C-alpha cells in the first residue's frame, strides 16, 4: 500500500511516500536521515501486517516541508539520503520540493 506522510497547503504538496509493499523494514533510511524524522515501526495503514515498515514519526508529519528541504528530495539531482539507500526503491516524494528547489542545488 501507499502511505503518504505530510500535508498539502497553499505552499504546495509535501509528502514523503512509503510504498509498504516494497519496504522490507531494513531501517537504512532511518539511519541516514539527517533530520531523524523516519523510523521503522508497525504498519499504520495495514494493521494486519506483522512486519514493521518505515514510517514518518507522527510528530514530524506537519514539518516535512522544512525538515526535508536541505535534502532537496526529487529535485533531479542526487537522490535524497533516504531514497539513495533504499534498495527496493520504496521511498518517493510529492512535487513540492521539486517545484520550489529544482536547479538550486543542495543546501550546505
Ligand atoms: S530503506 Fe527502504 S526498505 Fe529499508 S526501511 Fe527504509 S523504506 Fe523500507
Ligand atoms: S528527504 Fe532527507 S530529511 Fe527527508 S526523510 Fe529523506 S533523508 Fe530524511
Image (cartoon, rainbow, N blue to C red):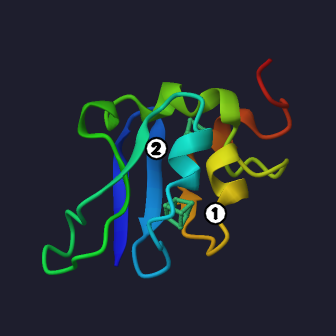
Q: Answer with the quadrant where ligand 2 appears in the image.
A: top right
Tell me the residue that label 2 is attached to. 14
CB at disc 1 and ligand 1 closer than 8 Å: yes
Q: Are marks 1 and 2 in contact (CB under 8 Å)?
A: no
Q: Residue 6 location, x and y as percent?
A: 36, 44
Badge 1 density bin: few <14, some 14–19, many ≥20, Cα 10 Å = some
In the image: residue 77, left or right of residue 44: right
Q: Quarter of the image holding residue 63?
A: top left
- The residue positioned 75% from the left and 47% from the top of the image is 75
Where residue 2 sits, quadrant-wise, is bottom left
Q: Position of residue 21 (x, y in %)?
A: 42, 82
Q: Is residue 94 above or below residue 62?
A: below
Q: Secondary structure at mark 2?
A: strand
- Image quarter in which the N terminus is found: bottom left
Compute the Cα span from label 1 to label 2. 20 Å
* Residue 99: % across, % down: 66, 42
- What mark, if any, has residue 86 been given in the picture? 1
Q: Residue at x 35, y 50 (%)?
A: 5
Q: Nearer the viewer, residue 50 or 106?
A: 50
> Tag 1, which secondary structure?
loop
Residue 7 horizontal/vertical position (percent): 34, 43
Mark identifier at residue 106: none
Residue plotted at (70% across, 37% down): 72
Locate the C terminus by quadrant. Answer: top right
**Side (left or right) of 68 relative to 64:** right
Q: Can you tell which of label 1 and label 2 is closer to the viewer?
A: 1
Q: Which residue is drawn at the image coordinates 73% and 56% (left, top)?
A: 84
User: Which tag, 1 or 2, sits closer to the chain's start?
Assistant: 2
| Crowd class of label 2 (few under 14; some 14 to 19; many from 20; radius 10 Å) | many
- Pick whichever, 15 or 57, lies toward us: 57
Relative placement, left or right, of 82 versus 1 is right
**Viewer-nearest residue: 50 or 81:** 50
Amino acid at each position: 500500500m501507499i502511505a503518504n506522510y505530510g500535508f498539502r497547503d497553499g505552499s504546495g504538496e509535501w509528502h514523503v511516500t512509503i510504498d509498504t509493499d516494497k519496504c522490507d523494514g531494513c531501517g537504512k533510511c532511518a539511519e541516514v536521515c539527517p533530520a531523524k524524522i523516519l523510523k521503522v515501526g508497525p504498519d499504520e495503514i495495514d494493521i494486519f501486517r506483522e512486519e514493521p515498515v518505515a514510517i514518518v514519526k507522527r510528530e514530524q508529519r506537519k514539518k516535512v516541508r522544512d525538515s526535508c528541504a536541505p535534502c532537496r528530495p526529487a529535485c533531479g539531482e542526487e537522490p535524497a539520503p533516504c531514497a539513495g539507500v533504499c534498495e527496493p526503491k520504496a521511498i518517493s516524494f510529492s512535487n513540492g520540493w521539486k517545484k520550489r528547489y529544482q536547479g538550486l542545488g543542495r543546501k550546505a
